[in-house]
Amino acid sequence: MKYDFDAVNDRRNTNSIKYDFFSENGVPSDALPLWIADMDFRVPDCLIEKLKQRLDHGIFGYTDPKPEYFGTVCRWFETRHNWRTKPEGWVTTCTVVFAICSLLRAVTKPSDAVIICQPVYYPFADSILNNGRRLVVSGLKNDNGRYTVDFSDFEQKIVENKVKAFILCNPHNPVGRVWTKDELVRMGEICLKHGVFVISDEIHSDFVFGNNRHVGFAAADDRFKDFCAVCTAPTKTFNIAGLHISNIYVENDAVREKFKKELAAQGFIQPNLTGLLACQTVYGYGAEWLDGLLEYLEENIGFAENYVKENLPRLKLVRPEGTYLLWLDCRGLGFDDKTLSDFMRNEAKLWLDDGYIFGEGGGGFERINVACPRSVVKNAMERLKAAISRI
């Protein structure tokens, strides 16, 4: 392999949320952190060199993207996902969560209902509630580890609560589903029928495995382009979350102007200089690195899956179709949520994301980030096996 993803990089003492905030989160310092969704891999060399060149310039004033930036973004999504976009439809922001909050304020009013399908990325619920909107939940159906949308419940909740917006997770975090075109069309037709605006978080779109293919919500059906915003970023794909850059696609001119006005009302004007540079660089020159990474991640997932099957019969692993996040069913241990969390942190010495924080249907599960060297994944599995053997 051209890229050494096996290398163990010391991230301590870098103000890393993952590695430098154990005591602040009440976690033992000897726990292995596999919780927050960033990776333990160095970024592509092309980005390091480009950032060094820019730093050597020594002046870091106000910066905006030129047309070439949006051209690069358009080419990335057309090449990787067969999704054609218009350069003028893109809007840069700092992060996807910030964009979701801004979009909610742009397309809904206070006390309007917003629906999500839990278990799902927990900042969705926070974004809705923190902005004075009403949270509506339609739970995903779990058929022996295969998650699907309960379309009957989804539509019923929309009608009963007069829902105005839907935050879609595509691919889905934490259950790892890569929604098919048919599933997206069915969701979209329900939303179209009832006047529901769709905010599609597609930040994990580059992490898709096997025969699965990512289909963007806006690309699923031409009818959907007019009532959606697609939230993307290179930050998950290339491990640059700290550089704060995201690209939001809104084809509807009127909605895009409302979105921009909401950004301006919050004082957001120019994006981060290094974020812009990083995005244009990795989308322009990072594809080979990403291809190697995807191969490595798929092997990590396979390793973990086999280990659980062979050594941890009381647990069940939901193999992800996308994302580098494992959804581990620990209900066979018979613990309540607090006991399970304590067990993982204090007995297994693993710092994971507890499933209950993802909402309805998350209790009894743990989310594990395997975007790390395989030796770390192996260490985590062995810690878990040893801890369970002592029960």
Image: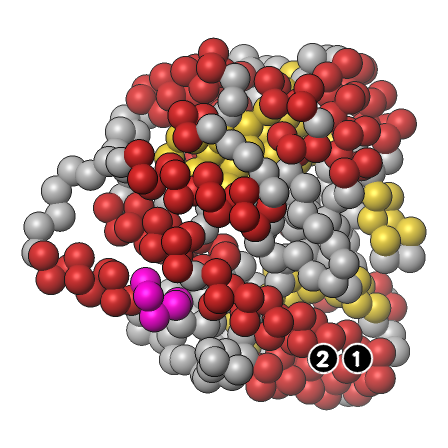
Which residue is depicted at the point 54% across and 42% down? 78
Instruction: Tell me the CA gap for discs 1 and 2.
Output: 5 Å
Residue 45 is covered by the magenta coloring: yes
Dot 2: what SS? Answer: helix
Q: What number of labels is visible?
A: 2
Q: Residues within 10 Å of mark 2 (few under 14, many from 20)?
A: some
The stretch in magenta equals: 43-47
Tell me if residue 336 comes above or below residue 133 in the rendering.
below
List x then y, in percent, for residue 102. Answer: 45, 26
Q: Is residue 276 left or right of residue 52?
A: right
Q: Which of 97 and 295 is in front in this view?
A: 295
The residue lying at 85 percent from left, 21 percent from top is: 156
- Can the viewer see residue 165 in this picture? no
Name the residue carrying label 1.
306
Q: Work out whether residue 152 or residue 323 is closer to the camera in this orientation and state it.
A: 323
Residue 303 numbered mark, or none: 2
When asked about the image quadrant of residue 363, the answer is: bottom right
Instruction: Characterize the magenta stretch by its predominant secondary structure.
Output: helix
Q: Position of residue 304 (x, y in %)?
A: 72, 76
